[in-house]
Amino acid sequence: MPRVLRAVLFAAFALVLIAPSAGAEVRWLCTPAASADPCRGDLTTRVTAPDGSSRVERVEAARNPAVDCFYVYPTVSNQLATNATQVADPEVGSIATYQAQRFSTRCRIWAPLYRQVSVVGVLASSQSRDVAAYDVALGDVREAFRQFLRETDGRRGFVLLGHSQGSRMLRALIRRDIDPDPALRKRLVSAIIPGANATTKDFSRVGACEEPGQTGCVVSYHTFNQPPPGNARFGRTDTDPVGRALDLPGGDVICTDVQKLSGADHMETLLPTAPFAPGFVSALLVQFYGGNPPTAEEPWLVPRDRYTAACAKSGGANVLRIEPDGPVKALTPSPDATWGVHLADVNLPLGNLLRIADAQISAFKLARRPVSVRIGARRTSRGRRQLTATVRGAPGQELRVTLYRDRKFLVRRTLSLDTRGVGRQRFRLSRAGSYQVKVREGARGPVVSSPAQRISLH
């Protein structure tokens, strides 16, 4: 057992640890209204090629993103109580920079401060199997999510972001609050929740993401660079020492092949270069990298090392196995082999996750696109013209298209929009007049009209 782990485990049992009572107020680490927070910052990136050459890439946060992100950070607190207080300690800021900041290029980020189970608390719970502290943490996350919903437009989509304990909180949040609610499911762009043993039994209606651009689904995986041991903490639920927390079910663990889903040929690693705040996680990062993490003069780095990844079942665990793509610096599973390369679950494929989110956000926006219609006419023969109504809306949407001449009903047809959300309906005209097309979804949907157009047959 690593020295730092032994020291913290001793502290866990040497102290009298009492979880705070429920009912804390909502406090935020990151919100769009904040003047500055760790979920935003300078995203200038040093991109290093495998041959050692490099270039600088300028990256900007989105100015008016179409969706929001709700981020719940993993276990990082150095506080020596089972449940940490709602304080933006330095290590909390560091992990938000590592995991959430790049998503500011895709969404407005909301991140609650919550009474997470601290590092000490996780180690104690893993030994005692007492998981009551996780209920305290979830209470804060659910209350923050309710406030998030109140303060955002009821039609805006949202992406859930988490890792480890944060992902466990979001598993429970989806199970209790989103999966049963059709309106919230409709707003769910996706949930990116690695490192918490999400299973196929977690949800009734929200499934795993399997196709590019699929929305309302879950991305979950657990990275290992070696075959997982028989007592692996991730990739299976029967060996998860806190698997009973929050009444989450056991079963087959989801593994999303993020490299394949993103359409990339390798893992697209992104790392911030500022040192991680001192504490338990920073010590493990030194163990993980065999020294200080890679760095550069710019705030972000694409390191020289490249990896490929694919889902694989081994030793009873379903995990995302990463393999070197050329010479790389060895990564040491930390705290031990049962965790795999859990510390880098998010950053090893962060570029892939951004690609996946891009496709999902684009599909979500397209699915919510309002119906529009325009018309045009062309001559087909002497005394005849063809009128074409071009309709745009959501892919697969079925609409009723009605043609009028001089405000009098002529004909109604049904039109299905294609995968791009576009459809064309053509009408043959035999008389001159003022033509207009009206479009409606179903018998009671709102009516969208084209401008009237005067059409002569000569």
Image (tube, rainbow, N blue to C red):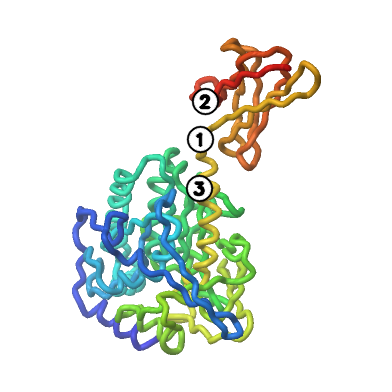
Q: Where residue 330 appears, x then y in whole percent?
A: 53, 86
In contact (CB < 8 Å): disc 2 and disc 1: yes
Q: Residue at x 44, y 48 (%)?
A: 66
Is any part of residue 422 visible from this angle? Answer: yes
**Residue in the picture at 56% in, 68% down:** 319
- Mark drawn on residue 448: 2
- Name the residue at 54% across, 75% down: 224
Separation (CA) of disc 1 from disc 3: 19 Å
Residue 367 placed where, x, y %? Answer: 54, 41
The answer to whether residue 234 is above or below residue 396 is below
Q: Find residue 425 and report its horizontal and vertical position in percent.
A: 68, 27
- Relative to 5, 251 lies left or right: right
CA distance separating discs 2 and 1: 9 Å
Name the kind of residue labelled 3 in the image: Gly
Q: Which residue is mark 3?
A: 216
- Say above or below: 238 vs 294: above
Circle 2: is it few (<14), some (14-19), or many (20+) Cα within 10 Å? some
Q: Quadrant of residue 392?
A: top right
